[in-house]
Image: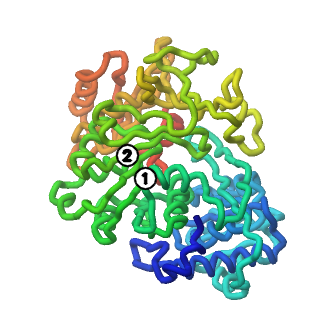
């Protein structure tokens, strides 16, 4: 339930290993260093319910700060280090950060942090990996703090922000747990740790940025049960396979884009690495194209599991490999909450009809911090304990959920709804396509029409002939009205490091 629980039994076991360098953090080091940081926070006057922020690329130090906050009853906000200083300051201000930790190589993102009153005092801005003007040195702060554990260690939790792919990031703040950190587990450890059999033998590969909810929380689960996290700096398809082989990884988490990148490696590269140690390869963040899921199961075996959830943690579904083969395209049945499919007015729809996906809980599961309007917009018109994050889909007769797209991405062409995800999932299977996004562009007659923005795979050259071939490839597989009207070839597509398309950036080019 807490890294400190394993100091007596496995003090020298790696809690985290940096895949790129082999540098590690043992359970003894993680416990002592997080204790020192917790004591530093207390010396600054921070108390239960206060907020600590981290702005950094993937670093072992993040784990020390994460557990310092969680053993102090505080909130931990991990901030996307790709944001501008203005965007970063918006989050630091909105979450009420009283201390900010930062990696020196992302200094530009925190360049103006001193303008925030709560962060302008000594000891409240701390940097590792080098110097940042106005920031204290992390190692010096660590050395100067007491290593004695505090007698009162209430459990804290994370306070994260949505990725902002469709607008300004929204803070998701939940009530603090009631109890001591070494006595009560977090929800993820209880639910997903049990579901995917995380134990002290787990070797968990994390190929994604730690500022994202799922990687941070699953790494926390691994530490909570005494396993080892293998932390990649960033996802690279061959490097991920090499890490699985080298460390005999048992658990891992991915987004579908990562599967696609690995599948597009030459066969001789894929066959170079032994992936037989994998017991659970979990994916989420976006529905997986049917052919991609099938190809991964053929390659890695029946270890591919999927869940659908969100940073808001409003609810979740899950599906295992056998059900995925038998019900292609489904994201599974409800794991947390009750699923309802509703029309725009909130009326519940029958089985098989597409609508907005709501999850019913017996409490209000989340609120957007400082934004009651957005919070209410995410709730059902008549039931505030039914919430949505904007996904559109339908249920089959056995309660399996199928997602068709996000409401924000729906294209309305001549009054007809087009869900671009369907054509995207087809196009990504064409050998010439490395990446694809379908967006709505203005049209004088129909209001808007679908356009495919395609990044070609190596060895392919843009041409009118290839564009026609791609449209024909889609047209052979779905109804004509769903087929994009045109193709544009782009050098790359705007994706977050977690693999999510930032479609608003594409749409700006055509508005």
Viewer-proximal residue among 136 and 486: 136
Q: Residues within 10 Å of mark 1 (few under 14, many from 20)?
A: some
In the structure shown, which secondary structural element does the residue marked by tag 2 occupy? strand
The residue sitting at 65% across, 80% down in the picture is 138
Task: Give left or right: position of 307 versus 174.
Answer: left
Question: Which residue lies most toward the left here?
Answer: 268
Residue 491 visible (yes or no): yes
The residue sitting at 78% across, 64% down in the picture is 98
Q: Quadrant of residue 33?
A: bottom right
The residue sitting at 36% across, 20% down in the picture is 482
Q: Quadrant of the N terminus?
A: bottom right
Viewer-proximal residue among 178 and 251: 178
Q: Nearer the viewer, mark 1 or mark 2?
A: 1
Q: Earlier in the sequence, mark 1 or mark 2?
A: 1
Task: Give left or right: position of 376 versus 276.
Answer: right
The dot on residue 303 is none
Q: Circle 2 sits on which residue?
A: 305
In the structure shown, which secondary structural element does the residue marked by tag 1 occupy? loop
The residue sitting at 65% across, 43% down in the picture is 168
Viewer-proximal residue among 179 and 45: 179
Viewer-proximal residue among 259 and 504: 259
List x then y, in percent, for residue 230: 42, 68
Residue 104 visible (yes or no): no
Task: Give left or right: position of 37 versus 307.
Answer: right
Circles 1 and 2: CB atoms closer than 8 Å? yes
Q: State the CA–CA distance, disc 1 to disc 2.
A: 9 Å
List x then y, in percent, for residue 84: 62, 56
Q: Circle 1 sits on which residue?
A: 196
């Amino acid at each position: 339930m807490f890294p400190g629980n394993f100091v007596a039994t496995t003090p020298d076991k790696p809690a985290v290993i940096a895949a790129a360098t082999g540098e590690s953090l043992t359970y003894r080091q993680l416990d002592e260093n997080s204790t020192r940081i917790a004591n530093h926070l207390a010396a600054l006057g921070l108390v239960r319910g206060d907020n600590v922020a981290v702005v950094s690329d993937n670093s072992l130090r993040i784990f020390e700060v994460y557990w310092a906050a969680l053993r102090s009853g505080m909130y931990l906000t991990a901030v996307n280090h790709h944001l501008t200083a203005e965007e970063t300051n918006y989050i630091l201000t909105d979450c009420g950060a009283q201390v900010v930790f930062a990696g020196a190589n992302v200094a530009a993102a925190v360049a103006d942090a001193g303008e925030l009153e709560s962060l302008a005092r000594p000891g409240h801005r701390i940097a590792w990996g080098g110097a940042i003007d106005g920031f204290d040195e992390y190692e010096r702060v660590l050395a100067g703090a007491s290593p004695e554990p505090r007698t009162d260690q209430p459990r804290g939790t994370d306070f994260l922000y949505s990725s902002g792919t469709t607008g300004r990031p929204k803070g998701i703040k939940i009530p603090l747990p009631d109890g001591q950190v070494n006595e009560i587990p977090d929800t993820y450890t209880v639910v997903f740790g049990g579901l995917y059999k995380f134990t002290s033998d787990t070797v968990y590969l994390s190929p994604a940025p730690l500022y994202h909810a799922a990687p941070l929380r699953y790494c926390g689960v691994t530490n909570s049960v005494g396993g080892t996290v293998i932390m990649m700096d960033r996802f690279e398809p061959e490097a991920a396979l090499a890490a699985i082989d080298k460390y005999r990884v048992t658990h891992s988490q991915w987004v579908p884009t990562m599967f696609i990148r690995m599948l597009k490696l030459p066969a001789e590269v894929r066959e170079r690495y032994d992936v037989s140690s994998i017991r659970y390869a979990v994916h989420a963040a976006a529905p997986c194209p049917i052919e991609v899921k099938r190809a991964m199961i053929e390659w890695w075996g029946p270890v591919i599991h999927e869940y659908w959830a969100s940073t808001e943690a409003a609810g979740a579904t899950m599906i295992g490999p056998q059900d995925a083969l038998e019900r292609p395209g489904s994201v599974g049945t409800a794991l947390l909450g009750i699923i309802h499919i509703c029309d725009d007015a909130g009326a519940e729809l029958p089985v098989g009809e597409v609508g907005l996906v709501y999850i019913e809980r017996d409490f209000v599961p989340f609120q957007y911090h400082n934004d009651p309007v957005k919070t209410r917009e995410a709730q059902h018109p008549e039931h505030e304990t039914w919430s949505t994050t904007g996904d559109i889909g339908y249920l089959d007769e056995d309660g399996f959920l199928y997602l068709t797209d996000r409401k924000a991405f729906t294209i309305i062409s001549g009054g007809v709804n087009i869900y671009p995800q369907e054509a995207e999932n087809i196009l990504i299977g064409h050998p010439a396509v490395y990446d694809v996004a379908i967006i709505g562009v203005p049209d004088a007659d129909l209001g808007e029409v679908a356009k495919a923005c395609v990044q070609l795979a190596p060895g392919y050259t843009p041409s009118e002939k290839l564009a026609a071939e791609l449209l024909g490839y889609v047209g052979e597989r779905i109804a004509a009205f769903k087929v994009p009207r045109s193709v544009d070839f782009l050098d790359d597509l705007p994706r977050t490091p977690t693999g999510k398309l930032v479609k608003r950036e594409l749409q700006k080019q055509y508005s």
